[in-house]
Each structure stands twice: as structure tokens, then as C-alpha cells.
Image: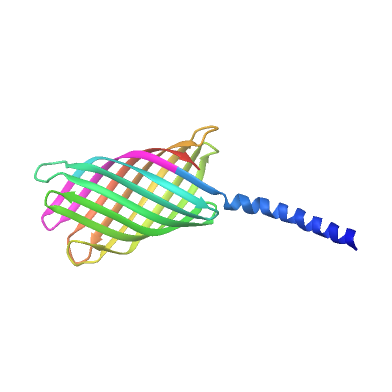
Amino acid sequence: MRPAIANGQSAIVVALVFLAAPLQAQLTGKLSFSLGGSSTRLTSVSGAGTAVLSGITIGGTGHFGVGRLSVEGDYRQGSLTPDSGGTATQDLVEGRLMLAVRPLAWLSVLAGPHAQAFIAPGGTERWLLFEARARAEGTVVSPAVSSHVELWAAFGGSVNAGTGAPSARGGEAGLTLHLPRSALWTRLAYGMHRATQSGTANARTVEDLRVSIGIGR
């Protein structure tokens, strides 16, 4: 009976080894970072009228994923000057933190807070939005070039000016070039984010053409 038991134990050990290999691969964390700059355009609508400002914003992103789950963050800031007279320069500070799940290999669903601060000489207007996002990714030229399209909408939030509830929607599309035999990549993307406040003329539209360089997968 002992040889049979020993053979059974060996078979169990071998099976666990074969099962552990793919499980370990699924649980291995993936980390990536990027830094970049954006040509940013802000269209600001209020009771006083419409102002258009533009400038360069600088920021970075971070992403950490395990299996189908991941966390990603984004931060940037910059100074925007008016395209015409009569409007003061504003600083834009923006950040977001998203929890993502990937139900399909090409699709990610994200949710989390997105904060924007518009800093002017007369005060700071702060928008806090809770957003739901969907991102689709695909390969354009394997394995060097990939693409993504992302859409989002806010399902709650607050503004420190006025009493109206905020709402927002937006989207982004981009191409990513992966350098051969390297973890380095570069990305070109265009995005638009429009936020409005109910019961007021208050609206902020931010458009970006962004170039970034990153490392990691």
C-alpha cells in the first residue's frame, strides 16, 4: 500500500505544480509609468460670458495591475493664458484615481474620482466628479502599434461654486508605439472633457493633444 500512496502523493504534487504555473502568471503584478505634456485648451462658460484659454500642461500616470484588476492614477498641472484680452490667466490642476476590471482581453471598465481645480486670481473653482469609464484597446500593427478609445460619464460629484449638481462626459482616442525588444513606449492621444453645472451657465470644456513616454506593460 505504501508504494501506491507514494505514487498518489507524487501525482498530486505534479498536478499542483502544473496548476500553480498559470495561477502564478495570472497573479504577477504589472507596473507602468509615463510622463508627458499636453497642448491644452480650456473653454470656460459662466454668467460673465465665454473665455478661451490655452497652454501647456505637464503630468504623469501610473498603473498597477494583478490579473484582471488594476489601479491607475493620473496627475497634471499647468498655466493657461487667454487667447484674447479681458480674461486672467488660470492654472489647471487635475488628478484622478481609477479602479479597473478587464472582463475581456480588449475591454476595461473603470470607476473612481476625478478632481479638477481652476485657479484664478479671484479664487479657485473645484470640481469633484465620480466617473464610470469604458476603454477598448486593439492592435493596429502587431506587435509595435496599438490603439485605444475611452469614453466616460460622471454619475455624481460636487462643485464649490453655486448649488447646482455637476455632470460630465468625455472621450479619448490614441495610438501607442511599443519600441522593439524594450519595455519603453510612446503615445499620442487626443481627449475632450466637458463638465456642466445644473441650473447655471457654468461649464468647463478641456481639450488635450498629449504626447507621453512610458515604461512597463
Q: Give the prevailing secondary structure in the magenta stretch.
A: strand
Q: Position of residue 101 (x, y in %)?
A: 49, 58
Judging depth in this view, the residue of 71 and 154 nearest the camera is 71
User: Eyeballing the image, is 214 above or below 111?
Assistant: above
Please give the name of the residue rendered at 76% of the width and 55% of the height, measured from the top-left corner: 13
24 or 148: nearer the eye? 24
Q: Quadrant of residue 79?
A: top left
Colour option used? rainbow
The percent coordinates of residue 120 (x first, y second) are 15, 49
Instruction: Between residue 12 and residue 160, name the one nearer to us.
Output: 12
Q: Is residue 51 magenta?
A: yes
Observer-nearest residue: 69 or 38? Answer: 69
User: Which region shows up in magenta?
Assistant: 33-52
Q: Quadrant of the N terminus?
A: bottom right
- Quadrant of the rendered structure where residue 203 is? bottom left
Q: Going by the picture, which residue comes out furthest to the front?
A: 2
Picture residue at 15% right of the left edge, 51% below the top: 50
Relative horizontal placement of residue 63, taking residue 39 as reference (left or right): right
Q: Quadrant of residue 56?
A: top left
